[in-house]
Image (cartoon, grey):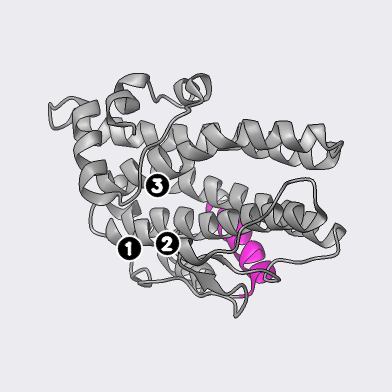
């Protein structure tokens, strides 16, 4: 007798509770692959953990306790930059997994597919950045890292509209703004390999922000309210940071984020 397929929530929970970075990447890509092949049931019989499992290193620090990187020209500063990017992508794996596993039951199969696709992308990004660090004589975990990146997920764990408003449409959209300048510094330093990694990440992140915007607009459409007004209200309520210029307007617009969302809320 053939056994019932594993639920997608069970598979996602298993990946979230995998602490080793390399193993988490493999687990995430395996969940995405099995879902794509129809080997996981659209069932939500297991709750998502309050927090994902974390490796012993890096040490997680509050933003105001993070050491300064120094000037980009030094090897130490370059390693610090790549390490910071790797940590952002590592946490992004968990953010995408949690999105699919926590809200998939109410949002549907297309939503699960899109955010497992995002999770697999983030795992690939992390793997590229991890190998980049190793090529520079370092590794992920060698330096302390920002400890507040999961906070936005925890704060919005009971509201999918708030989660979409904050994680893809603020945090990931910020990546669209800052990556081009980083890319130019990397190119100016003659690091073509690093430039290719950042170009790939930027292209993928436009699509990721686009997924978030797509589902946010669908949710708000049912309420009859203006999407920009709802978004601003949720950002003011749930986001503790600042929405800061300069903005990459063309990349944001490609992801469905017009200036009407963020222009008059920016600091």
Q: Is residue 32 magenta?
A: yes
In the displayed structure, 95 sits above or below 252; it is below
Q: Is residue 226 visible?
A: yes
Q: Is residue 115 magenta?
A: no
The secondary structure making up most of the magenta span is helix
Q: Residues within 10 Å of mark 3 (few under 14, many from 20)?
A: many
**Residue 115 at x, y percent in the picture:** 47, 47
Ranked by sequence position, the earlier of labels 3 and 2 is 2
Q: Nearer the viewer, residue 117 or 181?
A: 181
**Residue 140 at x, y percent in the picture:** 70, 66
Q: Nearer the viewer, residue 132 or 15?
A: 132
Disc number placed over residue 171 in the picture, else none: none
**Residue 146 at x, y percent in the picture:** 52, 62
Residue under the image location 79 percent in, 54 percent down: 132
Disc number placed over residue 167 in the picture, else none: 3
Q: Quadrant of residue 176?
A: top right
In the displayed structure, 32 sits above or below 176; it is below
**Residue 92 at x, y percent in the picture:** 52, 54
Residue under the image location 19 percent in, 38 percent down: 233
Disc number placed over residue 150 in the picture, else none: 2
Q: CA distance from mark 3 to mark 2?
A: 10 Å
Label 2 close to label 1 by CB (< 8 Å)? yes
Stretch in magenta: 20-35
Residue under the image location 65 percent in, 40 percent down: 201
Q: Is residue 90 left or right of residue 62?
A: right
Give the structural element (helix, strand or loop) at label 1.
helix
Question: What residue did someone put label 1 on?
Answer: 154
Q: Nearer the viewer, residue 178 or 74?
A: 74
Q: Quadrant of residue 110?
A: top left
């Amino acid at each position: 007798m053939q056994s019932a397929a594993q639920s997608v929530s069970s598979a996602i929970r298993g990946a979230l509770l995998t602490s080793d970075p390399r193993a988490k990447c493999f687990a995430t890509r395996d969940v995405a692959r099995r879902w794509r092949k129809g080997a996981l049931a659209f069932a939500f019989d297991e709750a998502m953990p309050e927090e994902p499992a974390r490796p012993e290193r890096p040490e997680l620090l509050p933003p105001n306790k993070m050491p300064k990187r120094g000037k980009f020209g030094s090897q130490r500063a370059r390693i610090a930059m790549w390490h910071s990017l790797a940590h952002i992508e590592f946490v992004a794996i968990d953010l995408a997994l949690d999105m699919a596993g926590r809200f998939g039951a109410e949002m549907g199969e297309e939503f699960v597919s899109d955010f497992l696709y995002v999770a697999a992308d983030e795992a690939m990004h992390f793997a590229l950045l991890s190998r980049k660090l190793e090529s520079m004589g370092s590794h992920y975990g060698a330096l302390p890292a920002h400890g507040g990146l999961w906070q936005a997920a925890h704060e919005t764990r009971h509201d999918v509209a708030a989660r979409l408003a904050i994680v893809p449409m603020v945090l990931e959209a910020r990546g669209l703004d800052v990556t081009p300048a980083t890319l130019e510094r990397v190119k100016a330093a003659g690091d073509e390999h690093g430039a290719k990694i950042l170009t790939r990440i930027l292209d993928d992140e436009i699509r990721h922000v686009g997924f978030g915007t797509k589902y946010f607009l669908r949710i708000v459409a049912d309420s009859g309210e203006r999407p920009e007004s709802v978004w601003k209200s949720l950002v003011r309520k749930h986001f503790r940071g600042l929405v800061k210029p300069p903005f990459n307007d063309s990349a944001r617009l490609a992801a469905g984020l017009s200036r009407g969302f963020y222009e008059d809320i920016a600091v």
